[in-house]
Image (cartoon, rainbow, N blue to C red):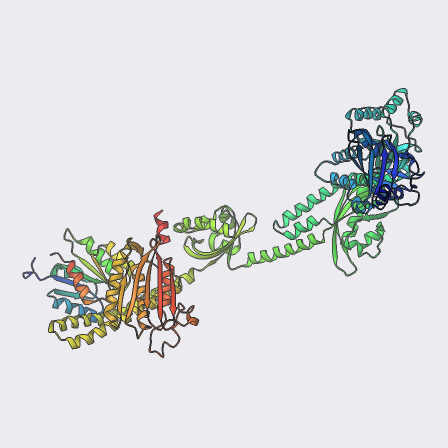
Amino acid sequence: MDTDLLLHTTIDSLPVGVIIQGSDNRVIYINKKAGEVFNTNVLKTPIRLDRLFKQGTLIMDEFGNQLLPDHFPASITAKSMTTTSVSVRIKTTQSDKERWYVINADPVADSKGKFEGVVSTISDITETMKQRQNLSFVDQITASLLGTMSYEERLHNLSSLVAHSFADWCSIEMLDEAGKLALVSISHKDPKKVALAKTMRQKYPGGKNANKGAWKVINNRQLEIYPNLTKRQLTSMAISPEHKKMLLKLNFCSMVIAPLVARNKVLGIITFAHAESGRKFTPESMREIEAISLRAAILIDNSRLFALSSQLIQNQTKIVNDLSESENTLKMALKAGNMIVWDYDVDTKEVTWTGELNVLNTMGARRKKRSIEAFLDHISPQDRNRIRRKLTTSLSRHQLLEDEFSIVDDKQRPSWIQAAGEIIKNDQGKAVRIVGIARDTTEYKLAENKIRANEIKFKSIFEGSLDIIIITDNRMNIIDINPEGVKSLAGSKSNIIKKKLIDIIAPPQRSEFSRNWKKILKNSAHQGTFRMINSQGEFCSMEYNASAHFLPGQSLFVLRDVTQRVTEAERREHLLGITSHELRTPISSIKVFTGILKRQLVKDKNKNIYSYLEKIDAKADTLTHLVSDLLAVTRIQQGKLELDWEMFDVNVFLKQLISEFKLSRKTHKIGLSGKIKKDVISDKTRLSQVIINVLKNAVKYSPNADKVLVKLKNSSKNFTITVQDFGVGIPTNDRDKIFNLYYRSGGSTSRGITGLGVGLYISNQIVKAMGGKIDVISREGHGSTFSMTLPIIPRAKSDEQH
Amino acid sequence: MNNTNMQKNIVIIEDDESLQEGLCLIFNNEDFCVRAVSNADNLGQLVRDFSPDLYLIDYRLPGDNGIEITQNIRAHENGNRIPIIIMSASGQSLQEEALRAGADGFIRKPFDVDDLIALVKNNLPA
């Protein structure tokens, strides 16, 4: 088979175009695909690359500028002997639509390195580019327009970005108030050329011929294209020999002047020019030119609106700050912006607007245009005349217009609009238009009304409350107090406003209050009771509820005078003390007489009667414990379980306790094991109450067992007393209830087990108060183990020691 | 001193009649010479006549309480410190208060007779 034919057939079937050029740059081969791309016939004889294309085929760079043969990738590769890759746009007479290609040119050399030619491949990337085209250069431009720079800086950025890629030159000129064109920016890669252009622009600002150049663009609002500027054309523009020299030096060869139009108003012009690169503007590059001019126009327009809107926003922010510093709704609404731009034409008496505002949409028509009278009719009657008046004043005095008004929609719902506008004057200095922005402030208004309503609510609570309400700053200074507070604590408001909250706390509790203050600020909500000094200079008990930071930097205290309640509690406590005393006294007598009798019987060696007496004595002890338990329950429930700390040897303590306990419980052996080396700090009386209760239960609930094991051990910080029995155990269902008050194990009565059901409740409460805990392990039918773990040095104690 | 057979004098102040009777019985059996009153009203006269070796005082009494009586006794004695034991149905905090006021011993009601006798004997000068 003919290898040459095979090769041709293969290359022809490739989805990419292939062009092969010889060392003289003439095309010697072009495959089918390449022929389709350039709309050309398959080659018969070698020809020059530019001759390859039929008349009407346009090859452009990615910006739409005509690509000259010298800039073809193959030409560059032939010169540089390196691989060149270029994106191009090609348009043929056959199709209106241009397509995008990547042309990749590779140099071919023989074994000795001698240049033999160039192989170019042409891949169609139209689909990819279609997706990308909106994100390419124009977006780069857009991105450069965002940011925090001034708009002049941003405009300059834009022109310089253009001059580094899209065109050789770019300049932006703006119409000033006097109707003159002012140069804002001119850019070229070479700063020397920029200087030259600036000098020329200064010296020859250009005439005002409405039919030529810039002014034609401004007046017609249409861009002007000079695709091929000849030297003659350039020379004809010159006003003086010097100007001519400059123009020739700048050597523009292709130029586009575009108007900058925003909201139907010409703001200036932007000029693009090619010079030394020899590139030409084509109709295809107009899309980019239009996009760039539009963005530049928007940028200028925005900058004008910016001044207005920033003023508006400042006012808005002020309102927000005044009303409530914590109302997020307002801030979010502010963020959302939601504004429109409006334009009132004095001559036509029409208002037009761009952008969307729901309330304006409800006016009926989709048209964003209204006569001023029709517009004013929509404004609520209470605002209408004011707005009309302001409009007139603004126009006659050339003042900034600023106001807020409400509009009632078709469903009678009010919406609020805040508007500001700037007067636009004509050449004669007459106000012809007002241009401004407006925003829907309904959300703020509603929030404001809500806050006002809340304020009224708060105020009525504040004024009318029977509780005392005090507002302080973060340094405890009292900044407000309600009438009840004045009545109970101060006598007069001015008296207390100067004070700090701590000044009206009872002196013994001030340091505690200072400590709590930190907690209050930290936790935001805090409750407690404090003794304070009332207006009569007496101490009173105040229950307080603090909401720290209810407003930034402010805390709110609601205080209730509970002196009476506290006094009653004290009375009850007193009564309880008497009751317990009254109960103990007869028991004391019983014990005294049994004691006397016992001693007598020991002397008489009458063992029978002695044992009866011992039983009476034991029951008197039981009675004593019951009284103690009841007293303890009351104290726990009042939160008044007081502990008397002392340091002691827990080994000795436990040994004594158990030996005393053994006397009354002969049925069980109580084994004690384990020792701890440290002395502990605890409340002996309370601790024995706990141990006795647990031991009593151990014996009570193990009627068929004969022993109870007590163990003592310690860790570095805690000591543990374990009481293990071998009895009935605790049913699984009941395990979390055993520490409840008046709880008694299910079926305990049927087993003949008696008691008040307070023992474990008290024990648990005491252990908790001591900073410890009780753990229970139990197996039904096998017994229970109670472990009391307590701190060797309780926290309250260790605090005191520091 | 004026007790020839070394019999010790004890003053008991207890307002509960039954308990007072029991206490008298206990200390009589222990060979004490006992004077019992139910309040501190005529204590001065009693002390001058009886010259006690020890006081056993209930805390809760009509009129002055046990601690106030203790303070009174301590304020008026001249160089001759007589042991005082306070009895009370109240708890530990009172014990500290009693000791601070000048008492030498404290016993919580109800108590074992043996414990009371031991406490009294321990507080008597040999």
- Quadrant of residue B40 in the image? bottom left
| Residue A235 located left or right of residue A314 | right
B48 and A588: which is toward the camera: A588
Q: Residue at x 31, y 64 (%)?
A: A691
A603 and A46: which is toward the camera: A46
- Quadrant of residue A687 in the image? bottom left
- Picture quarter with the N terminus of chain A: top right
Above or below A411: residue A516: above
Residue A151 can be seen in this image: yes
> Which residue is farthest front?
A1
| Residue A268 located left or right of residue A721 | right
Image coordinates of residue A88 in percent, x first then y, are 83, 39
Above or below A521: residue A636: below
Image coordinates of residue A261 in percent, x first then y, are 84, 40
> Which residue is farthest top?
A241
> Which residue is farthest left?
B4
Q: Residue at x 76, y 60 (%)?
A: A412
Image coordinates of residue A507 in percent, x first then y, are 40, 49
| Residue A577 located left or right of residue A251 | left
Residue A168 can be seen in this image: no
Above or below A740: residue A404: above
A17 and A542: which is toward the camera: A17
| Residue B37 located left or right of residue A142 | left
